[in-house]
Image: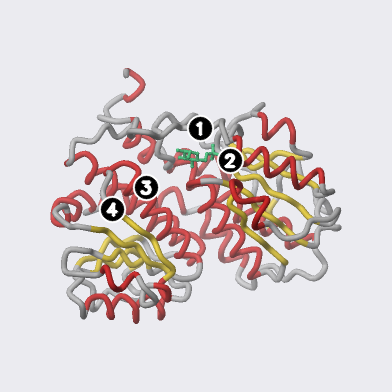
């Protein structure tokens, strides 16, 4: 337990370690407005036509983040839950890149999906935290997220480092593929990335997540919505919340709320609406719809986007490029989950029934 230092739990330590982890993730990978990975020199993806991400749990949400960016660059992209690979993955050929996103590099479902894809001719790339892991050894190439060891079962810093690594990787891939159009504002995006560690520091210093968790703790259900890039943040927020609080939490794409989940919305079901400057209108409309049914709305994101004027509460983050704002919103949601679980007296670092790495299918 000495490893927890001044913190009560590894999870809180790892949340606070994110500025350092992110600095390590970024180091040496952005040079003169270009993205460079030692293992993947320019031209590495010249033959790539389709990118298929495979992952589980939190890593799946990071994969969604990367896939959305790649789709915006014009590439054919798919995100497949590794456990459902056989029944849901699209066709694969030698121009398919299968990207395994796995913190541990040992998740059986993910390893199995990559083996299936490579048997069908795909080229493989592992994006992992663990040097020498099975995923890293078996894949054609490996890129490390450099988050450092994570002890808490609930993934926190590794999600942030995965999302940043994948955002950079998408720029690297898009630069090689002739049909792709790298992001128009890519220079601004990469310049803002250098400030991300200090923005995370600011969130950690000024957050009101503990007070908010205390205010909302008697609720029946907790919903998380977001659109565009924020959708994956909403799904991750809900997953983290249910994993460590044992409370009922669900994440939805904003526009999906009215197609069923709205029946569950009451004054005892707060809605965390992730608004980051990427497709926020739908989030705003649907949050207001829920609010009119009595649900308290918590706007999570930079102040000058979306919902601030009508929300019942806000968890603010520094204003930055939408690609990074979602990751700051995620840090706020990590803290809400942590404080809620702490107030409920849950065993935060080792939630019941869950394992850090699931090595059975
Ligand atoms: C388990 C863990 C999750 C993790 C998932 C994928 O379900 O409890 O926290 O996100 O496995 O793990 P990986 O090591 O492949 O990222």
Mark 4 and mark 2 lie on one chain; the one further toward the N terminus is 2
Q: Residues within 10 Å of mark 1 (few under 14, many from 20)?
A: some
Q: Which residue does the numbered mark 4 point to in the structure image?
A: 248
Q: Nearer the viewer, mark 2 or mark 1?
A: 1
The local crowd at label 4, few if under 14, some if 14 to 19, many if 20 or more residues have their Cα within 10 Å, is some
N-terminal label among 1 and 3: 3
Q: Residue furthest top?
A: 2
Name the mark nearer the viewer: 1 or 4.
Answer: 4
Q: Distance of mark 1 from mark 3, alpha carbons? A: 15 Å
Calculate the distance from the C-alpha at mark 2 to the C-alpha at mark 1.
9 Å
For residue 190, above or below residue 113: below
Q: Specify whether tag 2 is near ligand 1 (CB below 8 Å).
A: yes
Badge 4 element: strand
Q: In this image, 32 relative to 227: left or right?
A: right
Badge 2 is on which residue?
102
Q: Which residue is mark 3?
A: 240
In terms of secondary structure, where does tag 2 sit?
A: strand
Callout in the foreground (4, 3): 4
Image marks 1 and 4: residues in contact by CB distance under 8 Å: no
**Image coordinates for residue 40, horizontal then vertical, percent:** 77, 45
What numbered label is drawn on residue 357?
1
């Amino acid at each position: 337990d000495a490893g927890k230092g001044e913190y009560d739990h590894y999870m809180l330590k790892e949340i606070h370690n994110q500025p350092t982890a992110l600095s390590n993730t970024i180091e040496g990978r952005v040079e003169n407005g270009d993205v460079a990975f030692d293992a993947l020199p320019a031209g590495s993806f010249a033959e790539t036509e389709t990118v298929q991400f495979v992952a589980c749990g939190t890593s799946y949400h990071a994969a969604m983040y990367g896939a959305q960016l790649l789709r915006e660059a014009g590439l054919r992209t798919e995100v497949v839950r590794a456990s459902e690979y056989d029944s849901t993955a699209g066709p694969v050929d030698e121009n398919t890149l299968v990207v395994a996103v796995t913190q541990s590099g040992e998740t059986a479902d993910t390893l199995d999906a990559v083996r299936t894809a490579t048997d069908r001719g795909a080229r493989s790339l592992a994006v992992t935290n663990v040097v020498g892991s099975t995923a890293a050894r078996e894949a054609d190439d490996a890129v490390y997220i450099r988050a450092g060891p994570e002890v808490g079962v609930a993934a926190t810093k590794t999600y942030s480092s995965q999302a940043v690594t994948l955002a950079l990787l998408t720029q690297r891939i898009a630069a090689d593929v002739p049909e792709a159009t790298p992001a128009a504002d890519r220079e601004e995006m990469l310049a803002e990335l250098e400030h991300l560690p200090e923005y995370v520091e600011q969130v950690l210093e000024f957050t009101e997540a503990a007070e908010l968790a205390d205010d909302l703790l008697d609720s029946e259900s907790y919903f998380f919505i977001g659109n565009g890039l924020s959708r994956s943040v909403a799904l991750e927020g809900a997953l983290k919340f249910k994993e460590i609080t044992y409370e009922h939490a669900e994440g939805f794409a904003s526009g999906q709320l009215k197609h069923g989940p709205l029946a569950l919305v009451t004054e005892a079901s707060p809605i965390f609406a992730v608004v980051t400057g990427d497709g926020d209108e739908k989030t705003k409309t649907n949050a207001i719809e829920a609010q009119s049914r009595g649900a308290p709305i918590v706007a999570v994101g930079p102040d000058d986007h979306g919902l601030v004027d009508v929300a019942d509460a806000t968890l603010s983050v520094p204003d930055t490029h939408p690609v990074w704002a979602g990751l700051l919103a995620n840090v706020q949601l990590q803290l809400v989950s942590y404080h809620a679980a702490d107030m409920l007296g849950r065993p935060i670092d080792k939630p019941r029934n869950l394992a850090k790495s699931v090595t059975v299918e």
